[in-house]
Image (spheres, rainbow, N blue to C red):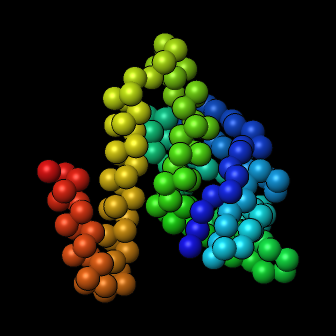
Amino acid sequence: MLSVKMLKPYYVKEDEKFIRIVLAYQYFSMHIDGKLYQFVPLESREIIIDRKRQKVHNVYDIFVFQRGSKLIYVAITDLLQLGDFLTHLNSIVHPYFRKDMGYEEVSQKEMDNFFHSLERENLKRMIDQALDDGDKDRFKLLTDEWKLMSG
């Protein structure tokens, strides 16, 4: 089981198309199967958000977490399935989207739409994964959830 203990950017870099959340050792840690692991920048070290679509651009990148000599590799797609990860991520990027919109506050409806779009994208990826794995029960469960979400 995965859960975020801490997620803070080392720094945030922005340009016209993307918001880049750069991560470092002390700023990102996860509980994995009840044990605390620290982020190590061996593979990917940033989360890239597409400003226009307001979605994570580099979903297939891999983050590495370390506890002692043990390394665990976690895809961003897996992290995007965690509610606490999405909450941390939203709190980081929220001020950058406010600047894009040209006014101080983003409405609750806009925030809800952003979260809903993230949830839909995650559900699509989970359905694709169930198909790839040949897991008919999980596929049925997820497609039923998709119908509820879309209906």
Q: Is residue 134 above or below residue 74?
A: below
Asked whether residue 134 appears in the rendered view, the answer is yes
Q: Is residue 107 above or below residue 36?
A: above
Q: Position of residue 3 (x, y in %)?
A: 60, 63
Position of 10 with respect to 33 (left or right) is: right
Asked whether residue 44 appears in the rendered view, the answer is no
Q: In percent of the image, x 82 and y 53: which residue is there?
A: 26
Residue found at the far bottom of this picture? 134
Q: Position of residue 59 (x, y in %)?
A: 51, 58
Q: Position of residue 97 (x, y in %)?
A: 51, 28
Query: Which residue is at the front of the view, 3 or 75?
Result: 3
Q: Identify the image quadrant of the N terminus.
A: bottom right
Q: In percent of the image, x 26 and y 82: which residue is there?
A: 137
Q: Is residue 63 above or below residue 117?
A: below
Q: How many marks?
A: 0
Position of 134 with respect to 43 (left or right) is: left
Q: In percent of the image, x 61 and y 31: which residue is there?
A: 15
Residue found at the far right of this picture? 68
Residue found at the far front of this picture? 34
Residue found at the far top of this picture? 103
Q: Is residue 46 above or below residue 61?
A: above
Query: Which residue is at the front of the view, 90 or 31?
Result: 31
Position of 84 with respect to 141 (left or right) is: right
Q: In percent of the image, x 27 and y 69: which residue is there?
A: 142
Q: Position of residue 2 (x, y in %)?
A: 58, 68
